[in-house]
Amino acid sequence: MKKQFYIFLILFLFFSTLVGIAYQSEISNNSIPNETIDKQITETTSLMNSDGSKIEHYEKILLQLKARSERLNYENGILRSGNLLMRVYYEQGKYKMVVELGSELKSKINKYNSTPKHIISNIYRRNALSLSSLGLDDAGMRDFKKAIGYAKEIEKEGSRLYNLSLCYENMTVIYNNEHFNGNTKYRDSIRHYLNKGLDMATGIHDNDKEITRKLKYSQILFIDIRLGIFFLEQSDVKGSIEKAEKYLLDALRIYEAEKHDILPGYKVILMNQLSWLYMEKKEPEKSIEYANRALQLEKVNRDPHDRIESYEFLTDSYLRLGENEKSRYYMKEYSHLKDSLAYVQKNNADTIMKKLVTQVDDEYIEKRKKMLAFIFISTLIVILVIVLLWKRKNKHIHRKYEQMIEKLKNDEIGKKIKSSASQTSNTITSETEEKLLSDLEDFEGSELFLKKDITLRFLSDQFGSNTKYLSEIINKNKSQNFNNYINQLRVNYIVHKLYNEPKYREYKISYLAEACGFASPQVFATAFKRVYRVTPFYFIQNLKKDAPL
């Protein structure tokens, strides 16, 4: 399910919008064509925000507006129309075209110094998302950082907060890509930036002149969805399902509120995540209901990634209901669509990677060399430190081994564990204590401790006592609990066998563990190391070296 998290994120660009939807270009009053271009771009933006089903139509209009702006050398028109085209291409899954157009627009940004900061930020942000969608995370992160830098320079508070919210939320796609999965550090980064994006969005005033309520609450809803997904991905952690439900129901309340006109595409995403939530809650009927609602909404705002999610949840939910035929149908649809998208994405990624490599300039190469040199030197230092620590640790371990051999030579490692004088509770009489200590001494000499099923209850019954008294005697006089006491007896037994009978050194660890009563080789190795600070393998290998058979 974690891999689905990445798919949810790439949907964001479909519905992210221009902050300055009412931007007025600072041009002379007699430049009527430029004003017309601005007006048409603003109208197209509004249409895209309200109806995402006519994507090919919007693409045609924007291409015309960009071409007209280029003929007039109208920088603002080029960048605004190009920025929206990046959004259109992304909605169609044309990541290669997004990056190509992004490279073109970025080169113009360096040429046009008067470009509004929110447009520049959006161009870098959308380009970063496309690069990350293709798995090119390093290049994506560089553009995300630039997008944040430009967003911070926006003067108007509402616009600045909104753009920063978009950047922080979008940037989590980097930390969520497959090679970061399972790393707690990056999971923490995802949650941190989602909360940071949410703080920015909630800080926008409802009556802000630049950012409409629709944009503000669509952004809040989307981050609530993302936080819900975050906790659904760790549903095995206690309390995560409840937290996911809280965020998703918060999003649903925003969605259902009449005063909030939410961006259409977000409705599909929300329905799919509610389907996932109820699948995790083992309520397949509700899961199917929301997945079907998502499919219906997706027909208006077409996107194959949405359908993949819906198919997956329908497959699992119908399977839980025992409706195998329907489950197989949706599994077939899911597999076919997923394979098709993977093929397209791989081809796009290969092409873009080649182009990125050819565009690397001398300055970047120099920085790369310095970075590689720094990494090389740092790696050498780390390797040196590791080698020194390893040698030091080996010397320490070998010292422990030598101490063991010395004690074995001097017969200081007994099969019995010496008792230490200690004050017991007043409830145990001295006669009872002496009897139990005597019984323990006999028990240590009997090798009864080699039985795998030996327990404190069994031993106390054998001694005609109770578990409480026996446990206290062992704790006070043997300085350890019952389990460690039994384990030490077993370890001492096998140590003597290994030292005195060379044939035991040829046996496997699993055999030795069983021979001295341990349930598994892992438990045996852990107990051995706890008692003598060396592993059984190390002890055996050094015995062979010191006294070869």
Image (cartoon, rainbow, N blue to C red):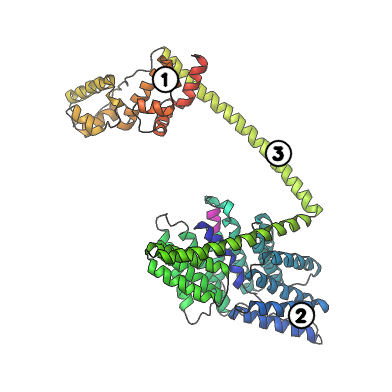
Mark 3 packing: few (<14 Cα in 10 Å), some, or many (20+)? Answer: few
> What stretch of residues is rendered in magenta?
186-190
User: From the viewer's perspective, is residue 476 above or below residue 234?
Assistant: above
Q: Residue furthest top?
A: 410
Nearer the viewer's eye, disc 1 or disc 2?
1
Q: Earlier in the sequence, mark 2 or mark 3?
A: 2
Question: What residue is disc 3 on?
Answer: 377
Q: Secondary structure at mark 1?
A: helix
Give the percent coordinates (x, y) of residue 476.
Answer: 29, 28
Question: What residue is disc 2 on?
Answer: 26
Nearer the viewer's eye, disc 2 or disc 3?
3
Query: Is 536 in the magenta?
Result: no
Q: Nearer the viewer, residue 471 or 245?
A: 245
Nearer the viewer's eye, disc 3 or disc 1?
1
Magenta stretch, main secondary structure class: helix
For badge 1, the amino acid type reads Tyr
Question: What residue is disc 1 on?
Answer: 504
Give the percent coordinates (x, y) of residue 436.
Answer: 21, 24
Q: Quadrant of residue 157?
A: bottom right
Q: Quadrant of residue 486?
A: top left
Q: Quadrant of residue 522?
A: top left
Q: Residue at x 48, y 66 (%)?
A: 330
